[in-house]
Image: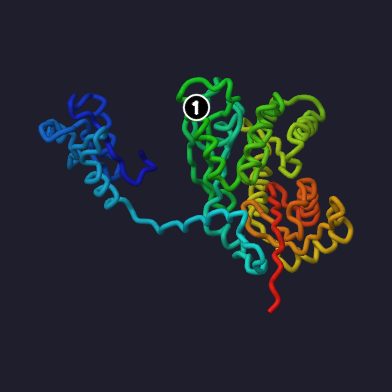
Amino acid sequence: MSEADAVVFVLDATTGTTPVDRELAQRLRKLGRPVFLAANKVDHQKREALATELYELGLGEVYPISAMHGRGIDELMDQVVAMCPRRPAAPAASADPLIGLLDEGEDPQAAEEEDPAVARAREPLRVALVGKPNAGKSSLLNRLVGSERSLVHDQPGSTTDPVDTPFSYGGREYVLVDTAGIRRKSRVEGATEKLSVSLALGQIDRAHVVVLVVDGSEGASEQDARLAGLIEDSGRAVVIALNKADLLSGAGAGRETLQEAGDEFHFLTWAPRQLVSALRGDGLAELFGKIEAAALQHGRRIPTAELNRFFTEVMEQYPPASRGGKLVTVHYIAQGGTRPPTFLLWANRKDLVDDSYRRFVANKLRQRYGFVGTPLRIVVKAKVKREKR
């Protein structure tokens, strides 16, 4: 309540005030925040007289409402919004560019976007903590923000709804999102857990960077690898946090844990890994550094002229293989979008450029430009011959 700009105090108009209501009212009077007393279950006009009894709490105007039927809600919210302090509207986050951003035959130079540093400074970095139950996501969030914002329990499943926590670190604004643990589909039980898992997966698409939290004391599992695959498919930047480093013992245990995680996440060789301890705070500064670096690479753009100089070298050394006696030529390359970085290749035979060559191009781009922490998308488009005039 002390962090709120306004408080809506909801009471059951049909039961009158209770000792708990009166105790809360006393606290709210001392709070120094606008308080709106909502008398719920006033489903029709005949019940409005019941709401008058709540004036005894001394909190000012009473708003008769029906949450079930929506009665009186608009009037209540109009008053709440009018009393809340106004803040500058946050700029809308630009939608991720579609893969087909450039039409066939369009000049690739036209795809240049604004400087990522400008976009970065405009909006808080949204970071989702995702992982299996009991991997330590809530403990990690609490350690990062320095307060008990998420419920922590030694039994898995204590987090059900995503918890958004805005905070600042190193002069940068963040929104950390704690999510419910995600188990294998066959082990998900009950409607509540199914909804929690659905909400957690939805946070992946909303995030700029996803931190996959793994129980480092147990090692990465097949379920962790499945989650990593979902994150890669979503196109989000990713950092792998191997939690519970305080439980590792023996010389070289940390190196072995990192190596084993690299083996389990062999398809995410580009994703940085960091040993952390939510209990002791080990590795958190390094984790933030990797989150920030991944976010920058996720929004990075390479100028078209530079890209084509680089790709000319690649083509000279490793041209695409001919198929069925047909020569495959890639005419030029351009970056069609960011978040994730998406590169467009214009070829004379789009259908003959296979997945292995796309992976080859992605690896070459990483060798030259890094792109640590972000997936890459390689899209092949057919080169359109322009008619001579």
Question: Which residue is pictured at 67% across the width and 51% down the height?
Answer: 293
Q: Position of residue 358 (x, y in %)?
A: 76, 50
Location of mark 1 (residue): 194
* Label 1 neighbour load within 10 Å: few <14, some 14-19, many 20+: some
Q: Position of residue 356 (x, y in %)?
A: 79, 46
Of 386 and 345, nearer the camera is: 386
Q: Is residue 262 left or right of residue 103?
A: right
Of 210 and 229, nearer the camera is: 229
Quarter of image, res 73: top left
Question: Which residue is pictured at 80% across the width and 53% down the height?
Answer: 364
On screen, residue 86 above or below 126: below
> Looking at the picture, which amino acid does disc 1 mark?
Lys
Quarter of image, res 344: bottom right
Going by the picture, which residue comes out furthest to the bottom? 389
Q: Position of residue 77 (x, y in %)?
A: 27, 46
On screen, residue 74 above or below 103: above
Image mark count: 1
Secondary structure under badge 1? helix
Q: Is residue 144 left or right of residue 308?
A: left
Of 184 and 107, nearer the camera is: 107
Q: Which color scheme is applied?
A: rainbow
Going by the picture, which residue comes out furthest to the right? 317
Q: Position of residue 41 (x, y in %)?
A: 21, 30
Question: Which residue is pictured at 66% across the width and 54% down the height?
Answer: 341
For the C terminus, the image quarter is bottom right
For the N terminus, the image quarter is top left
